[in-house]
Amino acid sequence: AALVTVLFHLGEMATATQSLDEDAFGVLGAELGYDIRVVSPEEEERELFSSFNIDLDAETEAETDEDLEARPPVVTVMGHVDHGKTRLLDAIRKADVGESETGGITQHIGAYQVHTHHEGADRPITFIDTPGHEAFTAMRARGAKVTDIAILVVAANDGVMPQTIEALNHAQAADVPIVVAVNKIDVDGANPQKVRQQLTEYNLIAEEYGGETMFVDVSAKNDQNIDTLLEAVLLTADAALDLRANPNKDARGVAIEANLDRGRGPVATVLVQQGTLTVGDAIVAGSAHGRVRAMLDEHGNNVQEATPSRPVQVLGLASVPRAGDTFLVAPDDRTARQIAEKREGADRQASLAKARKRISLESLNEALAAGKVDTLNLILKGDVSGSVEALEDALLQIDVGEEVGLRIIDRGVGAITLNNINLAAASDAIILGYNVRAEGQNADVAEREGVEIRYYGVIYQAIEDIEDALKGMLKPEY
Ligand code: GDP
């Protein structure tokens, strides 16, 4: 409240819960006798590491083509509930041609790798073992990009359902290529062609219809066509992505799952994204740190080294990191601990007053002018489907000019959910609520994450606001 008063005297209107823009912080700082600088989370991270003489970019910048080697694609399975995501992940696990050699029953550690033979070469693929787009988007909201390709599972007897659309929106918003697994083709009444046809509406056009998306008919129950599905993943990866990483340096990656094990202490499954993780390395993962005491693969076997795209369980951390935390190898134990401690301090501050500033309609024009964004991403929620469609149609008719794009990355009927907010945070989107609201805790999360939600009861008001924002005329709301 004291800050609000100071700001008021400076001629800035503010409420106690509003986050301030950079200029307001600067003015406020000057008034209070401080020099205030606003830094992005990435810059903050870079500064933290450089204070320990670690230059996060130097290695990457110095890398040449020769340093980079092909790495396996990392795949997430998404789709509507009960369409067979879990069963498909099981069938894929069984299809591992290396299974008999590696031995042992696959355990759930959060991710696993299968080995396939493709055009004479051994081609592993990494699967994230948590089905669904919720985990995917929650991780992305925290800045972690884990998935290279999404398998969208659609049951052929049920067709496209609400979560199918949600899942494909999330994948498309993240620019992740999709392979469609049309599942349950063994069931009476299965209609795989209908699924293809339904998905054309969402820009997923099957290759056989002249599009670019691979569709594979499978039965997870009968282990049918799983090989073809894996092949489609590899073909899509080869066609659309350049998946290479330098294995010859200290490892970096993401923690995808972690828990406190009674016998073994903190256990974290990490996905190595660059470099090689080796037993004995000192690591920092989020605000957890430690020395890698042992690493286990998905068969429970000890491994000494993990190369890019390899998921491993790591033992030896002093505390439990969070899913989506990035990890990296530090020069020594002491540095690892100090970085972790600093991060923990920063985390605590951040949760007190999250200065994370995401896009808002008011700041849009400035952000556009500064070249920080070139597209306005919107998520539409309404009370009935007719109003959502009407709103979408009207929005798409706005003349946004040449330089700016307007993209509706998700739409739906009903209250604003945590999922909507996560997607907005991950994609820098604004949510428009038409006769619906974010209820209870969800509103708090949106506030904390800096996601703007605008509420409307009449369509033209929403259209006018978006138009004005694009033209830089929107008056701040008090
Ligand atoms: P999830 O919610 O998407 O993870 O779906 P599940 O994998 O749990 O599958 C839901 C139900 O569908 C289970 O009873 C599965 O056994 C069944 N199921 C999954 N795949 C197939 C399939 O290919 N054919 C048939 N007939 N049933 C399947």
Image (cartoon, rainbow, N blue to C red):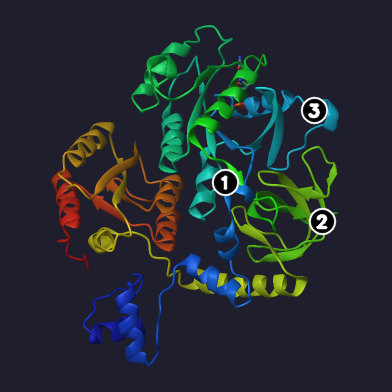
Residue 343 x %, y %: 60, 71
Label 2: element kind: loop
Mark 1 or mark 3, earlier in chain: 3
The picture places residue 446, in percent across and down from the top left corner, at 41, 57
Count of numbered circles in the view: 3
Mark 3: few, some, or many residues within 10 Å (few <14, many ≥20)? some
Q: Residues within 10 Å of mark 2 (few under 14, many from 20)?
A: some
- Vertical arrangement, residue 16 with respect to residue 102, above or below: below
Q: Nearer the viewer, mark 2 or mark 1?
A: 2
Quadrant observed for ligand 1 in the rendered image: top right
> Which mark sits nearer the N-terminus, 2 or 1?
1
**What residue is pinned by disc 2?**
279
The residue that label 3 is drawn on is 99
Amino acid at dot 3: Glu
Q: Is residue 244 left or right of residue 377?
A: right
Q: Does the Cβ of the disc 2 residue fall within 8 Å of ligand 1?
A: no
Give the CA separation, mark 1 to mark 3.
24 Å
Q: Amino acid at mark 2?
A: Val
Residue 175 lies in what quarter of the image? top left
Placement of the C terminus among the 4 image quadrants: bottom left
Q: CA–CA distance between discs 2 and 1?
A: 23 Å
Residue at the (45%, 43%) spot, across then down: 174
Q: How much space separates mark 3 and mark 2, taking CA atoms?
A: 24 Å
Residue designated by label 1: 146
Q: Is residue 314 visible?
A: yes
Looking at numbered disc 1 in the image, what kind of residue is underneath it?
Answer: Val
Q: Residue 229's image quarter?
A: top right
